[in-house]
Image (spheres, grey):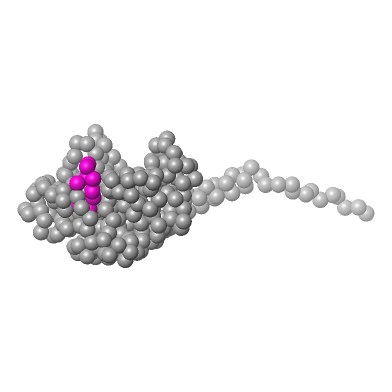
Amino acid sequence: MNSAPRRVRSGFTLVELLVVIGIIALLISILLPALSAARRQAAAVKCAAQLRDLGNAWGMYAIDNKGWWPVLKDDNYQVGFMTAPGDAFWWDFVSKYIAKGKKFGTSSTTAQEAADARNSVVWGCAAWTGYYSGALGEMNRNMPGYGMSFEPKITPHYPANNALTLPSAVNRARNGADSTGTYFKQSQWVRPSEKMLLADAKFYQVEQLILQTGTKLPGQDARLNFTYSTPALGGQNTLDVYRHGKPSPIEAGTTRFSMQGGKVAFNILYCDGHVSTVIDPVEGYRAVRQRFPN
């Protein structure tokens, strides 16, 4: 005798599908923060490696130039590939050690040259997206994501009494009509294990304004997490202190970040060649000014 045909199940019920989708959504919500944190950490590690490569390039430049180091910017200098004297930035001086035979820098004249520049270690921070300028190569080539600190002779005893003064122009590692200064030997950069050479920054130079007398964290006058803008306020700087962390919220009625919340994390290449991922904006201030008031 033939038995009754068995009923074959053809798929999931709607309830089962909704349960599976709910479980997947829950897993994604749990894993995404961990994946984001891992991505930020990987970018920070890659960025630190690129800064070490830049530090090695500065060392090789010093060897080839009797101990002299590049300046932040020279308005009338001919470097390697440049066909005539012009603006040379710090990366132009060390380009031959990192460009691997490719031409790049402020004299780039083709989209390929601009792309080669952006693919070099000078533009090597994976967390830096750059600024769109509409210029050749689309990105602003004067803002590579790293900035140079250009005051080699600042010591923990300067300025006296935390006065709102800066070193005289001649003591700055820059040269030109709009940036009076001079060249310095590597040995002239004081306290090299504590002094910043390059760091994650939103401009090609690191500017760290001196704090007002008596200012101390977490007072709102200490704007160590606030990128430099006009009008100038004590403590403002061009460091990208949230590059590898998480920005804090903007204070109501202002354009500055709150001192509360967020996660500071940015890389510093010190003059002795070591790199640190810094999680305190005060450390960034010290690396430029060599001391923190109070």
Q: Is residue 176 left or right of residue 5?
A: left
In the rendering, at what x and y percent does residue 23 appear? Answer: 54, 50
Q: Is residue 140 above or below residue 61?
A: above
Q: Residue furthest right?
A: 1
With 53 as the anchor, is 281 left or right in this view?
left
Number of numbered discs on residues = 0
Q: Is residue 80 left or right of residue 166?
A: right
Q: Position of residue 219 (x, y in %)?
A: 16, 47
Q: Position of residue 261 (x, y in %)?
A: 28, 48
What residue is shown at x 24% (from left), y 33% (from top)? Answer: 253
Highlighted range, magenta? 172-180
Q: Which residue sits at x=17%, y=58%?
A: 153
Whether residue 259 is visible, yes or no, is no
Q: Nearer the viewer, residue 190 or 283?
A: 190
Quadrant in which the C terminus appears: bottom left
In the image, residue 258 lies in the stretch drawn in magenta = no
Dividing the picture into quarters, in which one does residue 55 lie?
bottom left
